[in-house]
Image (spheres, grey):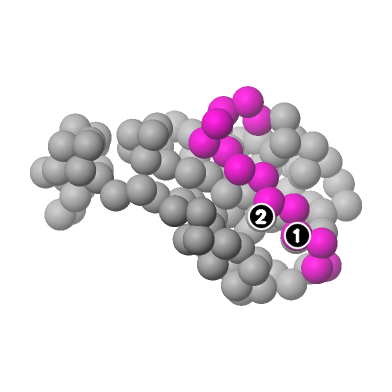
Amino acid sequence: MCGISGWLGHLPDSELPLVSLLIAAYNEESVIGERLRNALALDYPADKLEIVIASDGSSDRTNAIVEAASDPRVRPEVVHTGMRGNFGIRKDIVVPVRMRR
């Protein structure tokens, strides 16, 4: 069982829900590597966790850093809409992520 608390804490890993962690990013090259390491270290079964990094028109190395991640849980999503912000990214990405399930 994973170390999460609350009502899910008593479930065996096989019964935990699939979780998609959405991270909206714009020109985050200085911090995105650490954010990825932090997300990958979550105490949640690897086969139940998807980490979607939605880069909103980043012009720095954010996309390259995310795309270089070798963990299969990391899914880069490059959005070329130009700085739509967290709300715009969620609107563009959440529905397609749900459809993949």
Q: Mark 1 or mark 2, which is nearer the start of the sequence?
A: 2
Name the amino acid, label 1: Val
User: Please, what secondary structure does the residue beneath circle 1 have?
Assistant: strand
6 with respect to 91 (left or right): left
37 with respect to 46 (left or right): right
Q: Is residue 90 magenta?
A: no
Q: Nearer the viewer, residue 94 or 43?
A: 94
What residue did someone put label 2 on?
Answer: 54
80 with respect to 87 (left or right): right
What residue did someone put label 1 on?
Answer: 79
Q: Which residues are magenta?
A: 69-82
Numbered tag placed on residue 7 in the rendering? none
Q: Quadrant of the N terminus?
A: top left
Instruction: Identify the residue at horizontal 15%, vertical 54% (top origin).
Output: 7
Residue 27 in the image, given as x and y percentages of width and height: 79, 52
User: Please, what secondary structure does the residue beneath circle 2 have?
Assistant: strand
Q: Are marks 2 and 1 in contact (CB under 8 Å)?
A: yes
Residues packed near mark 1 inside 10 Å, few (<14), some (14 to 19) or many (20 plus): many
Residue 89 in the image, given as x and y percentages of width and height: 65, 66
Residue 86 appears in the figure:
no
